[in-house]
Amino acid sequence: MAKHISDILNDNRISFSFEFFPPKDQKASDTLYKTIAELSPRQPAFVSVTYGAGGSTTELTHDLVTRLQRDTDLTVVSHLTCVGTTFAGISEILDSYHNSGIRNIMALRGDMPKNGAPPSFDFRYAANLVGYIKKNYPDMGIGVAGFPEGHPETPNRLREIDYLKAKVDAGADYICTQLFFDNRDFYDFCERCELAGIKIPIIAGIMPATNRKGMERMADLALGARFPARLLKAFSRAGNDDAGFENVGIHWAAEQVRDLIDNGVKGIQFYTLNKSKATLKIYESLGITDSKNLI
Ligand code: FAD
């Protein structure tokens, strides 16, 4: 039986995990499986697979998740978004995961469509999905999203923690955060959670900025992540040198990870973008060979 992520996180070791997204064509699929083959020897505590909001990747996510569950020893978390869905649609997906042995779901709302609210929806917020899973699939482990620098739709920085607490009260077992570049934002978020009585483990989401375009895309998507001036200065020293830019981004992320480990983080999720290079370099620069030995 697949382990629950909360059991892994409550272990004394630090959990290192990798996020992938479902490939859209054969070439992308080949790249992803090569990445998985390169990262698997690092023995991640689990891997997670994203889901396109509005069901845009339902089948692709399902295929990848069930294949990983069937063909590898990896513990798999499947993301699921509820925006624009019905109880019946969500049940169909969860039944299928359950039958395939998946026992961990990352329960999300997903981004609202740009042209307004979706025509039909049984779930308004992720908290509703968490409650639904908890009630109907009690043996599923549930993760939820957290936003150290706030979520764009909730400018009220006091209320946002109440909404996060509602997801925890509905049955979430752990929180995984949006990416961030300044660890102080993560530590402050953890303290605010503690003040609000949120006691479940919090996983830090880390994604190195490895090229200028990627950095601009992150800023464009309004992921909320602030680029600290010190990081921007280091990037500007790299000038037009792409390799230099990549080195700076990876070095910065490695330092974030080292600092998080030193400060007792429960887990780190690497947003791999289906590539292994940056993650492997971070492992290498920290002298980590195997995630299972992390304490
Ligand atoms: P919610 O918790 O429902 O929050 C959405 C917004 O509503 C927030 O601003 C919140 O403060 C506010 N809110 C919550 N409850 C209330 C209430 N009762 N009254 C008023 N306002 C309220 N997206 C994907 O499409 N696929 C993925 O696979 C995916 N994976 C992700 C993984 C992680 C770790 C993270 C951090 C994000 C991920 N996302 C993914 C993005 C996420 O779906 C979006 O950021 C989305 O806009 C918010 O989702 P949520 O689950 O946090 O929603």
Image (tube, rainbow, N blue to C red):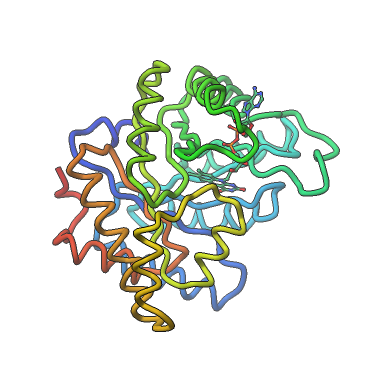
Q: Quadrant of the N terminus?
A: top left
Instruction: State whether residue 54 is above or below residue 188.
Output: below
Comparing 132 with 128, the one in front is 128
Residue at x-position 36% and y-position 61%:
231
Judged left or right of residue 158, residue 265 is left
Outermost bottom residue: 241
Judged left or right of residue 136, residue 7 is left
Percent of width and height locating residue 213: 53, 72
For ligand 1, the image quadrant comes to: top right
Question: To which quarter of the image does residue 22 belong?
Answer: bottom right
Instruction: State whether residue 188 is above or below residue 295.
Output: above
Outermost right residue: 119
Question: To which quarter of the image does residue 79 belong?
Answer: top right
Residue at x-position 65% and y-position 55%:
57
Percent of width and height locating residue 204: 36, 43
Looking at the rendered structure, the number of numbered marks drawn on it comes to 0
Q: Quadrant of the C terminus?
A: top left
Percent of width and height locating residue 109: 63, 37
Percent of width and height locating residue 129: 61, 29
